[in-house]
Image (cartoon, helix red, strand yellow):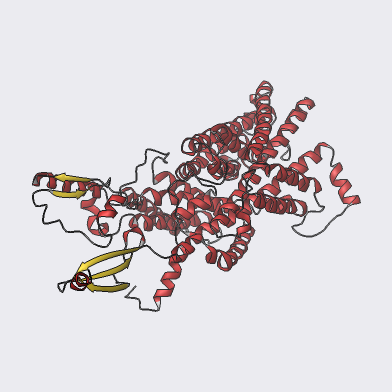
C-alpha cells in the first residue's frame, strides 16, 4: 500500500469491502428456522425439482428434433455432467448447513459482491422457472379439454397483441401459483407433505409408463428402417446433451434446504446422490420406452408420452400419463416456491437485501414475507408473459451459480484454517508479544501446544523433536506446496502465502475455460478463424487450463473426515466449470442481453442498499477488542499501553493510547 501512494488507499479499501467474506457462527446448527427435514424428505424434494415437465415434454422434443433414439445417451451424459455440479453442492451443503445455496457458498469463499450477484440471478431464475412451469401446467391441462380455457379467455375476458407478452392472460397459471404460495406459508412440514403426495403419484405413473411401455416396445423403431439409433450422429447426441442438462437443474433445492435439515452433514450428500440417481434413471428409461413405442420422427413434442399411448390405441393410459405430468409439474412449482424465498431470506439476513424479507414467522418458522411477495410476483409473470419468452431467459443464472460453486470448492479445499487461540493461552500471554521464557525456569521449558494446554519438556532432545513436529505440521498445512513438488516449484511458488497460489490458479482456470470454450463455439462461424489459428488457440488455452490444475494439485489439500468432500479435486470441479461455461456460451444473444440488464439492476440495489447495510460491514465498524500491556520503566514508573487486537492474528503495531501512571515511590508514600 505504501508503494502505490496515498491515492490508492481508498481504492484498495473499497475493493476490500466488495470482496469481504461472510463470517460463520461457531455453531452452524443454530437457526431461527425449524430443523425437521430427513434424508427422505430432502431426496423427494430433489426428485420433485428435477422430474417435472421435462420428463413429459423434453424427452419428446429432443428425440424428434435433435438426437433421435440416441436421446438415451444424451440424458446419460447430461446426468454425469450434472453429477459433477451436484457433488460440489453436496460438499458445501454438508459443510455450511445454511440456507441460501449458491449465494451462501459464494459469500463464504469468493466475496460479498459476487455472492450478491449470484443470489440476484438465481432469484430471477427461480421466478422465471416457476412462471414457465405454471404456464406449461395450464397449457397441458387446457390441451386435454381441447383448448376450451384459452378460447373462453380470448373471447370473453381479454386478448393482447404485444411482443413477448402472451396473447391472453393465463388466469389458471396465476391461480395455481397463488394457491401454492398460500400452502407454502403454512410451514416446511406442509410443503414437504404436499411434495410427498405429488412425488408419489408421479413415481407411480412413471412405473406404469415403464412397465406398460416395455410391453408395447418394438425394436424395429430403433432399426435402420426408421432412421437408426443415432440419426443425427455424434453432433446430435451432444446437442441433445446441452438441452437435457437443464432437466437436472432442480437438485440445488436440497442445498437450499440445508438449514432445515435434521442432520445436514449426512442427509445433504446422501439425498443429492439418491435424487440425482433416481432422476437420471427415470429420464433414461422413459426416453428408451418412448422411442421404442413409436417411431421417433412421429412424436408429438408437446405431449409425447400421452400421445404415444393414444396412437397405440390405449387412450385411457394417455389420461393416466396426463395426471402424472400435472403432479410432476406441481412438484417443480413447489420446489421453486420453496427455494426462492429462502435465498431472498438469506440475502436479507446478511443485510444485502431489504430487511423486510428477513422476518421469520414465529409459528410456522418460515420467511412468510419473502414467500408472499415473490410468490405473487411469480404469479404476475405467469399471468402476462408467454411461455417461449420465459423459457429463453432461463438457465444463465443457474449455470453461473454452478460455475462459482465449483470454483469455491477448489478455493476452500486449499485454504488454510484460521488460527484459533485458546482461552488459557490468552490468559497467560499477551496477544501482541512473544513472551520470553522466565528466568526461574531454566532446566525445563513451558511450551504451548495446539490444544492450548501447557506441557513441560525436561530434555533438549524433546525440544528438538517438538521443533521437527512443528515443521512437519507446517509443511502439511493446507495451501502449501507438497514436499515432493518443492524441488521443482519451490523457488517459483515457495514465497507465497498458503492458499494464495491456488486462488490465482482458480481465476486462471476460469479465464482459460472461457477462452477455450469461446474458440470452440465462435471460432469457425462468428470469428471465421482459419483452422491453424483455431488449433493453436486450443493448444494454448488447453495447456494453460491443464497447467493451472497441475499447480493446484501440487498443493496440500484440507482433509476433513467429518463431512462429505468432493473426490478428485481439483479435476471434477474444473470439469464442471468447463461444462458450465460451454453451455453458457451456447445460449442465445437475447439471454445475454437479459443477463446484462438484470446484473445492472442488481448493482444498483447493491450499491444503493446492500453495501451500506451489510452485516459484515457493520461488524468491521464495531470497536475492536483492546489489549493492555504493563511495562515497568527503569525509573520505577508503571506505563500502560493499550493496543487494538486485529482479526486473524494481525495486530496494530502502533500504540493507540498511552497512560503513564504514578511512580512506585509515590504509591508507597500514599499508602
What is the residue that sits farthest to the front in this orientation? Answer: 671
Residue extending furthest toward the top: 215
Coordinates of residue 442 in the picture (x, y in percent)? 9, 52
User: In the image, what residue occupies the spot 10% across and 44% down?
Assistant: 458
Picture residue at 59% right of the left edge, 42% below the top: 250
The answer to whether one can see residue 195 in this image is yes
Left or right, 364 with respect to 531, comes to right
User: What is the total number of numbered labels drawn onto the structure image?
Assistant: 0
Judging depth in this view, the residue of 513 and 633 nearest the camera is 633
Figure quadrant of residue 525 = bottom right
Quadrant location, the N terminus? bottom left
Q: Is residue 242 above or below residue 206?
A: below
x, y percentage for residue 364? 64, 43
Q: Position of residue 585 (x, y in %)?
A: 55, 55
Q: Residue at 50% of width from left, 48% of height from top? A: 579
Out of 245 and 268, give the one closest to the viewer.
Answer: 268
Which one is in front, 482 or 292?
482
Residue 564 lies, in percent from the top left, at: 43, 39
Q: Quadrant of the C terminus?
A: bottom left
Give me the residue at 84% from left, 37% from top.
145
In the shown orientation, is residue 280 left or right of residue 92? right
| Residue 55 seen | no
Lateral position of residue 660 relative to residue 288, left or right: left
Amino acid at each position: 500500500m505504501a508503494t502505490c501512494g496515498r491515492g490508492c488507499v481508498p481504492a484498495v479499501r473499497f475493493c476490500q469491502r466488495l470482496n469481504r467474506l461472510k463470517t460463520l457462527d461457531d455453531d452452524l446448527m443454530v437457526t431461527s428456522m425449524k430443523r425437521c427435514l430427513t434424508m427422505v424428505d430432502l431426496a423427494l424434494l430433489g426428485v420433485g425439482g428435477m422430474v417435472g415437465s421435462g420428463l413429459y415434454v423434453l424427452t419428446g422434443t429432443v428425440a424428434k428434433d435433435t438426437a433421435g433414439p440416441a436421446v438415451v445417451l444424451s440424458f446419460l451424459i447430461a446426468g454425469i455432467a450434472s453429477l459433477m455440479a451436484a457433488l460440489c453442492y453436496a460438499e458445501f451443503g454438508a459443510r455450511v448447513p445454511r440456507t441460501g445455496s449458491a449465494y451462501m457458498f459464494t459469500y463464504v469463499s469468493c466475496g460479498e459482491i459476487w455472492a450478491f450477484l449470484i443470489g440476484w440471478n438465481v432469484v430471477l431464475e427461480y421466478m422465471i422457472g416457476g412462471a414457465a412451469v405454471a404456464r406449461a401446467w395450464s397449457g397441458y391441462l387446457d390441451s386435454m379439454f381441447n383448448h376450451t380455457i384459452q378460447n373462453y379467455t380470448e373471447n370473453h375476458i381479454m386478448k393482447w397483441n404485444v411482443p413477448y407478452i402472451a396473447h391472453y392472460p393465463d388466469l389458471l397459471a396465476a391461480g395455481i401459483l397463488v394457491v401454492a404460495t398460500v400452502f407454502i406459508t403454512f410451514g416446511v412440514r406442509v410443503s414437504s407433505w404436499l411434495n410427498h403426495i405429488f412425488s408419489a403419484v408421479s413415481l407411480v405413473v412413471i412405473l406404469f409408463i415403464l412397465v406398460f411401455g416395455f410391453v408395447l416396445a418394438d425394436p424395429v423403431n430403433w432399426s435402420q428402417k426408421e432412421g437408426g439409433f443415432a440419426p443425427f450422429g455424434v453432433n446430435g447426441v451432444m446437442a441433445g446433451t446441452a438441452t437435457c442438462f437443464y432437466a437436472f437443474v432442480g437438485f440445488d433445492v436440497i442445498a437450499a434446504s440445508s438449514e432445515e435439515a435434521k442432520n445436514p452433514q449426512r442427509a445433504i450428500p446422501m439425498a443429492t446422490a439418491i435424487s440425482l440417481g433416481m432422476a437420471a434413471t427415470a429420464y433414461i428409461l422413459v426416453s428408451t420406452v418412448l422411442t421404442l413405442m413409436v417411431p421417433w420422427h412421429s412424436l408429438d413434442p408437446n405431449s409425447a408420452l400421452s400421445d404415444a399411448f393414444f396412437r397405440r390405441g390405449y387412450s385411457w393410459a394417455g389420461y393416466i400419463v396426463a395426471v402424472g405430468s400435472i403432479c410432476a409439474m406441481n412438484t417443480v412449482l413447489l420446489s421453486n416456491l420453496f427455494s426462492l424465498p429462502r435465498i431472498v431470506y438469506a440475502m436479507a439476513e446478511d443485510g444485502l437485501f431489504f430487511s423486510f424479507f428477513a422476518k421469520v414467522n414465529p409459528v410456522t418458522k418460515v420467511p412468510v414475507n419473502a414467500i408472499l411477495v415473490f410468490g405473487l410476483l411469480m404469479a404476475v409473470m405467469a399471468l402476462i408473459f408467454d411461455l417461449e419468452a420465459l423459457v429463453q431467459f432461463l438457465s444463465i443464472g443457474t449455470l453461473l451459480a454452478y460455475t462459482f460453486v465449483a470454483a469455491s470448492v477448489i478455493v476452500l479445499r486449499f485454504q488454510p484454517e484460521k488460527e484459533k487461540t485458546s482461552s488459557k493461552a490468552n490468559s497467560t500471554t499477551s496477544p501482541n508479544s512473544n513472551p520470553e521464557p522466565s528466568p526461574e525456569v531454566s532446566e525445563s521449558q513451558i511450551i504451548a501446544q495446539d490444544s492450548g494446554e501447557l506441557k513441560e519438556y525436561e530434555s533438549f532432545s524433546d525440544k528438538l523433536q517438538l521443533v521437527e513436529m512443528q515443521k512437519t505440521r507446517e509443511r502439511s498445512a493446507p495451501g502449501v506446496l507438497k514436499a515432493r513438488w518443492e524441488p521443482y516449484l519451490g523457488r517459483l511458488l515457495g514465497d507465497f502465502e498458503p492458499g494464495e497460489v491456488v486462488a490465482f490458479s482458480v481465476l486462471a482456470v476460469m479465464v482459460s475455460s472461457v477462452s477455450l470454450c469461446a474458440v470452440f463455439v465462435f471460432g469457425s462461424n462468428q470469428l471465421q478463424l482459419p483452422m491453424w489459428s483455431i488449433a493453436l488457440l486450443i493448444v494454448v488455452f488447453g495447456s494453460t487450463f491443464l497447467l493451472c490444475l497441475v499447480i493446484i494439485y501440487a498443493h496440500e489439500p484440507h482433509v476433513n473426515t467429518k463431512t462429505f468432500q468432493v473426490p478428485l479435486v481439483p479435476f471434477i470441479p474444473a470439469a464442471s466449470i468447463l461444462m458450465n461455461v460451454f453451455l453458457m456460451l451456447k445460449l442465445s444473444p437475447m439471454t445475454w442481453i437479459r443477463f446484462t440488464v438484470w446484473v445492472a439492476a442488481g448493482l444498483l440495489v447493491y450499491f444503493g442498499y446492500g453495501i451500506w447495510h451489510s452485516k459484515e460491514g457493520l461488524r468491521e465498524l464495531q470497536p475492536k477488542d483492546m489489549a493492555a500491556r504493563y511495562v515497568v520503566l527503569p525509573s520505577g514508573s508503571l506505563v500502560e499501553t493499550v493496543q487494538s487486537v486485529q482479526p486473524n492474528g494481525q495486530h496494530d503495531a502502533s500504540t493507540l493510547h498511552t497512560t503513564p501512571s504514578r511512580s512506585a515511590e509515590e504509591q508507597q508514600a500514599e499508602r
